[in-house]
Amino acid sequence: MEKNAFNVKTLTTGGAIAALYVVLTLVAQAFGLASGAIQVRLSEALTILPCFTAAAVPGLTVGCVLANLITGCALWDVVFGSVATLLGAVGTYLLRKKPLLAWIPPVVSNAVIVPIVLQKVYGVPDSFWFLMATVGAGEVITCGLLGLMLYKALSRTKVV
């Protein structure tokens, strides 16, 4: 019985994280921040959550898939953008004991993968390095600054 309770709790936690990711992406999209060369997806702040629970890894990935589908991204963007989120979330989980470093994997995975998607899928003419810098800057803002603020706030609560 205990094992089923754990699975239900994990599934519920992951689902809640996925839903929150989608909502925060839609808020960012409403302000024109969720896509393009400079992306400041508020939802990316949630990539710090694998420091608290392994359920965040699939939750963030599913949330990214759904958010990308809902916001009208191309199929390859849905696939590879979600892979970038998955890789970043796994990296964060692996660094969960070092939160001051745990925000870095999502920044790196998105800063490397998303520019390729922008160039190949959307035909964005800018150079890879320019796109890497702009996408990376948005990720530093959301994963680094906002993510660490979220980590600090959640660390003080008994919610997680």
Image (spheres, rainbow, N blue to C red):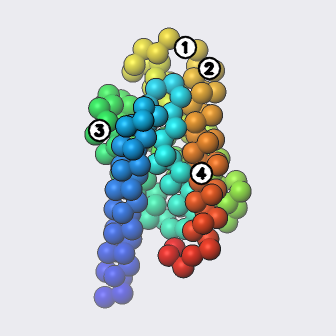
Residue drawn at point x = 67 percent, y = 60 percent: 99
Residue type, label 4: Leu
From this view, report whether residue 93 is shown above or below residue 76.
below
Amino acid type of the residue tagged 3 in the rendering: Leu
- Report the amino acid beneath label 2: Phe
Mark nearest the camera among 1 and 4 is: 4
| Above-or-below relation of 34 to 9 | above
Mark 2 neighbour density, 10 Å: few (under 14) some (14–19) many (20 or more): few
Classed neighbour count for the residue bearing mark 1: other residues with Cα under 10 Å, few (<14), some (14–19), many (≥20): few
Tell which tag, 2 or 4, sits nearer the viewer.
4
Q: Which mark is residue 146?
A: 4
Query: Quick one: label 3, few (<14), some, or many (20+) residues within 10 Å?
Result: some
- Real-space Cα separation, disc 3 to disc 1, in angstroms: 24 Å
Dot 3 or dot 1: first in sequence order is 3
Q: Secondary structure at mark 3?
A: helix
Lower position in the chain sequence, tag 2 or tag 3: 3
The label on residue 69 is 3
Label 4 sits on a secondary structure element that is helix
Residue name at image x 39 percent, y 44 percent: 27
Secondary structure beneath disc 2? helix
Q: Which residue is mark 1?
A: 126
Residue 95, position as x, y percentages in the image: 65, 58
Q: Are marks 1 and 2 in contact (CB under 8 Å)?
A: yes
Q: Secondary structure at mark 1?
A: loop
- Residue 91, x across and y down, in percent: 58, 52
Q: Which residue is mark 2?
A: 130
What amino acid type is highlighted by mark number 1?
Answer: Asp
In space, the residues marked 2 and 4 are separated at their CA atoms by 23 Å
